[in-house]
DNA sequence: CTGAAAGCGCTTACAG
DNA sequence: CTGAAAGCGCTTACAG
């Protein structure tokens, strides 16, 4: 591959200084038009590759952002990520991605790596039980950070997420309006604020309607299709057979519906099921899933925008909470409660 | 955040040179045990963050690898990625990820970024119609590269993928053995070698069994659930109503089954459907999907391993093709052809 | 076992 | 409008 082409290579063969080459390549008005063109043409010809590490060492800006989520194979995060990607591409920022799988150490390793690389900022959906100290490490090192979907208690940073309590009440009230009186809540964990908010929203909607809330009707855990599928038998064996299931997310709901179908019942007819998130595949599930749109594209876009603003010094308020307003999308997985139930 | 802590900060407050600090932190045996301990303790105390950019500028190794695939929201790539991640984590390598969405320019931008960052290597599933020149750019700049799932014609680099022709014949022969005579092939494109291989495999299995292959029975395109879902009406309107569908991948198959169900037929009973890949969700689809395991974990692990080996100079042969042997996993979406069909 | 010095490839005041 | 020089924070011969 011959000798590596650098600014000085270009400069020498053109008889100008590296400073001029540097400025010319970055379109500085300080350099004469003609010189600029000559430099650029020659750079292209030589196959010059800009060395970002050197530039970054000098300027202490890297053009790299970090994104950490629980698991990008979860389409909920996938959809957020896609809109982050679009926003960052437009601003010619590179991002590095990591899953933490709710392991605090894996997350910490990644944050450390970001600091070593001189990342300009971080978008994160923090792991369960992330210690405040891990976040302080970021601020101490001057790394602008925003949260998506989740946050860390006691840490004042901008948060972008859906309004969970309101969203789950939309789903619960929808089932209630269809005449359901025994409604279970399937999936999710009470270890996250999101989990607690959604459970609270479900409970308060039930109470407001004068309906009973039974502890047994809360099946904690499932957040994936596989787990939702497995929860079906437990759900179908519940005391006082619920006729409706408010699920933590679309994945658990789709899994649950598959499990219900496997047991010989018809989801959407015998049992009404609601999801949460409105993933792209909710609409093509069988039956099509009634669910709550959770604003993934908005969350991603706004969070990326806010981070870029922070990096540029436009100081958005700390601890600012941006709640995306959820919407109920009614499809075929919910119907009027069956007579006699 | 006070002053930035660097090697010289540690050195000065300890009365040793930065060279010694550098060596000590990297556990060099050149440094006395006692000094090493003192340095490390002090670095920790001061909250020293290793500056990888500076190190990388000096050593021209970055510890960064690039991974480019079509779309990580596709669980096929997601599953490969997960195993790449495991392998790279174990070797303490950071990776940067990008989707190309089959847009050659987006892919080129990313490769350029990798070179600017001084990446050590690339794992890629190249975009359709990737020009040879783009790949030559990588080799000219000394970037070790391996292919997964797809390759670029005329470019001699190691490739890791499943044996498509053999795999699709497993699915086709399975339907044939169940008595199906009219079998369509749904989804995928003939613009990739994978697409051509699978279609050829299907055609030759049909011919070998003395069955007719009709052009109309080839519905090109669908690679997603949504597209598979939409293809259902087209499939059901096909001349001489096929009784079986060999699908390009699990996503198209699951979408197709949903569409068939929506039309009032029962997939797995009225129409037999096979998938390809054996994604985690194939087993919990309704009906559970008969499909061909495509070795995603193997592909990811072997490709990552091979790249690391190349980077370390263990020169694995160019143009070497590693075919993972697919396996048929029979579930409920295929059954003996219905009488009278 | 430790230190002084050079250099990786940029950018940025500063001088002209 | 252009150039000479310093410096970003490391690592690596080299000398002692």
Image: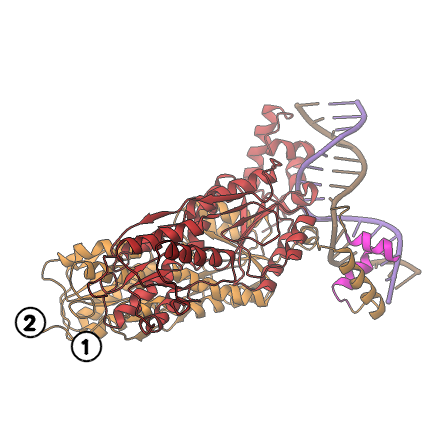
Chain colours: A orange, B red, C brown, D purple
Span colored in magenta: A6-28
Residue A163: image location, x then y, percent: 35, 69
Instruction: Please tell me whether the stretch drawn in magenta is mainly helix, strand or loop.
Output: helix
Q: Which mark is residue A340?
A: 2
- Report the quarter where the C terminus of chain A lies: bottom left
What is the quadrant of residue A327 in the picture? bottom left
- The residue lying at 44 percent from left, 62 percent from top is B188
Q: Is residue A26 magenta?
A: yes
Tell me where residue B121 appears, x and y as whole percent: 60, 46
Q: Nearer the viewer, residue B255 or A283?
A: B255
- Residue lying at the far front in this picture: please name it: B210
* Residue A165 visible, this orientation: no
Of the two numbered discs 1 and 2 on the same chain, state the one appearing first in sequence.
1
Q: Nearer the viewer, mark 1 or mark 2?
A: 2
Give the residue at mark 1. A177
Q: Residue A54 location, x and y as percent?
A: 70, 51
Q: Is disc 2 placed on a helix, strand or loop?
A: loop
| Left or right placement of residue A334 versus residue A141 in this view | left
Q: Chain of mark 2?
A: A
Q: Is residue B266 visible?
A: yes
Label 1 resides on the chain identified as A
Which residue, as the protein is rendered here, is positioned at the far left? Answer: A340
């Amino acid at each position: 591959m011959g000798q590596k082409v650098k600014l000085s290579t270009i400069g020498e063969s053109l008889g100008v200084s590296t400073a001029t080459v540097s400025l010319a390549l970055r379109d500085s008005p300080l350099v004469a038009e003609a010189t600029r063109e000559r430099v650029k043409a020659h750079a292209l010809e030589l196959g010059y590759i800009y060395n970002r590490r050197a530039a970054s060492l000098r300027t202490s800006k890297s053009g790299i952002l970090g994104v950490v989520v629980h698991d990008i194979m979860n389409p909920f995060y996938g959809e957020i990520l896609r809109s982050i990607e679009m926003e960052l591409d437009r601003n010619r920022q590179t991002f590095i991605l990591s899953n933490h799988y709710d392991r605090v150490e894996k997350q910490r390793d990644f944050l450390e790596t970001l600091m070593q690389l001189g990342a300009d900022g971080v978008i994160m959906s923090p792991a369960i039980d992330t210690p405040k100290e891990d976040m302080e490490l970021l601020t101490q090192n001057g790394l602008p950070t925003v949260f998506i979907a989740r946050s860390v208690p006691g840490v004042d940073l901008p948060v972008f997420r859906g309004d969970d309590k309101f969203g789950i009440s939309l789903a619960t009230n929808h089932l209630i309006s269809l005449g359901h009186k025994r409604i279970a809540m399937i999936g999710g964990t009470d270890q996250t604020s999101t989990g607690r908010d959604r459970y609270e929203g479900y409970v308060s909607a039930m109470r407001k309607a004068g309906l009973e809330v039974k502890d047994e009707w809360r099946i904690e855990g499932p957040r994936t299709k596989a787990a939702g599928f497995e929860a079906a038998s437990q759900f179908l064996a519940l005391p006082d057979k619920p006729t409706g299931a408010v699920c933590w997310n679309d994945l658990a709901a789709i899994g649950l519906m598959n499990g219900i179908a496997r047991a010989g019942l018809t989801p959407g007819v015998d049992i009404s099921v609601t999801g949460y998130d409105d993933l792209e595949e909710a609409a093509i599930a069988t039956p099509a899933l009634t669910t709550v749109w959770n604003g993934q594209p908005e969350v991603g876009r706004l969070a990326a925008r806010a981070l870029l603003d922070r990096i540029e010094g436009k100081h958005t308020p700390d601890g600012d909470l941006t709640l995306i307003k959820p919407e109920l999308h009614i499809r075929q997985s919910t119907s009027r409660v069956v007579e006699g139930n």
